[in-house]
Amino acid sequence: MKLDLISTLAGTPMEKYLPAGWDMKKFDACCSHPPETITHRQRWWNKDFAPIPIDNEDDIPIMMGHDVAMEIKRTAATKRKLALILPVGAGFYRWLVYFLKSWNVNCKHVYGFTMDDWSDAEGNTYKKNGPKSFQVGMEESFYEPLGKLTVPTSQRYYTTRQQLPRYPWLMNKLLKQGARLVLAYGIGQTCHIAFWEPQLAADYKSEEEWLKQSYRLGMPLHPLTVQMEALHNFSSRITLVPACANTIGPGLFLKAHYAIGVASSTKAMNLWVTLRHQPDPWIPSTYVTTLSGKLYFGKAVAGPLVELAAARTKARRKPRQRSRGARK
């Protein structure tokens, strides 16, 4: 008798808990490949998209910080405007600041667009000086530490109820002026990019319509996202996690000329599904493979994805190799 999620899901609360468009048999198939095949190219990938396995996961923030810093440096050298779509709370900012200050690169040509923020159902966010404001997070981690080299205040944009609806117009204006658009992202617990959640796929009649969506105000977050945010950012106190958020959508983040992403150690299944499942609105992260860019992950994240106890038992049963000179 097989006991797993797929065989026991029917009729349980978990059945309605998962996004309706998720085919768990397909998810399971995506995760069943040998770890060493994770970088094998798929036919729908952009020719310039590459998943990058890293021996030490702690090095990834350094690499991401360097990559974003190089984008800023190159565009400064060519006098080209640079629009950055940025996450809040990412570990690469201190390295981004380090490289820019070491190279003495001025960010006067940079336009920063924060990708999401907590909100209420109407799209109202924390006040500018609120303790959990994403604006405060960006100012403290990126803009303020740069000092005189920083992004001009008038070129910093946040997903507030007032500013987010202007994002499409602002980005299109910059693109028409020849700006380069770069996306920095992490794959979310529901395979979301920013807070663009999978259940939003049900709101649109076609993939084409879904792809045009630029933003959402006061969007209800999926329970998986709320739970993961509680565990990672609120000391497991789920009562502190807002149930709604403002976020950019595929109509903006899929316009990026280049994307630099990460799949953390807690997102192993999400990484495999992102790389192996064809692009699907119910799985937003699958679309990053259609962009030019890099997706960093620790080598250990590739798996194998098996029950931990089973993996330990298998390791103990593995026959030891005889050393040279040992008696036969």
Image (cartoon, rainbow, N blue to C red):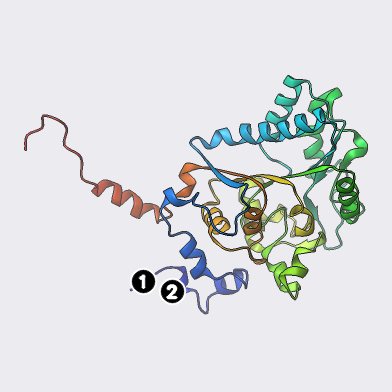
Left or right for 53, reference 209 = left
Marks 1 and 2 close (CB-CB < 8 Å):
yes
Q: From the viewer's perspective, is residue 19 above or below residue 294?
A: below
- SS category of the residue bearing label 1: loop
Residue 50 in percent (x, y) is at 58, 46
Mark 2 closeness class: few <14, some 14–19, many ≥20 residues within 10 Å? few
Asked whether residue 105 is in view, the answer is yes
Between 231 and 225, the residue placed more toward the observer is: 225
Task: Identify the residue at horizontal 80%, vertical 26% (top origin).
Answer: 146
Between 322 and 121, the residue placed more toward the observer is: 322
Between 155 and 228, the residue placed more toward the observer is: 155
User: In the figure, residue 201 lies in which quadrant?
Assistant: bottom right
Residue 212 in percent (x, y) is at 79, 64
Q: From the viewer's perspective, is residue 133 above or below residue 166?
A: above
The three-letter amino acid code for the residue at tag 2 is Ser
Instruction: Quickly name the residue at label 1.
Output: 2
Instruction: Quickly name the residue at label 2.
Output: 7
Q: From the viewer's perspective, is residue 309 above or below residue 277?
A: above
The three-letter amino acid code for the residue at tag 1 is Lys
Of the two numbered discs 1 and 2 on the same chain, state the one appearing first in sequence: 1
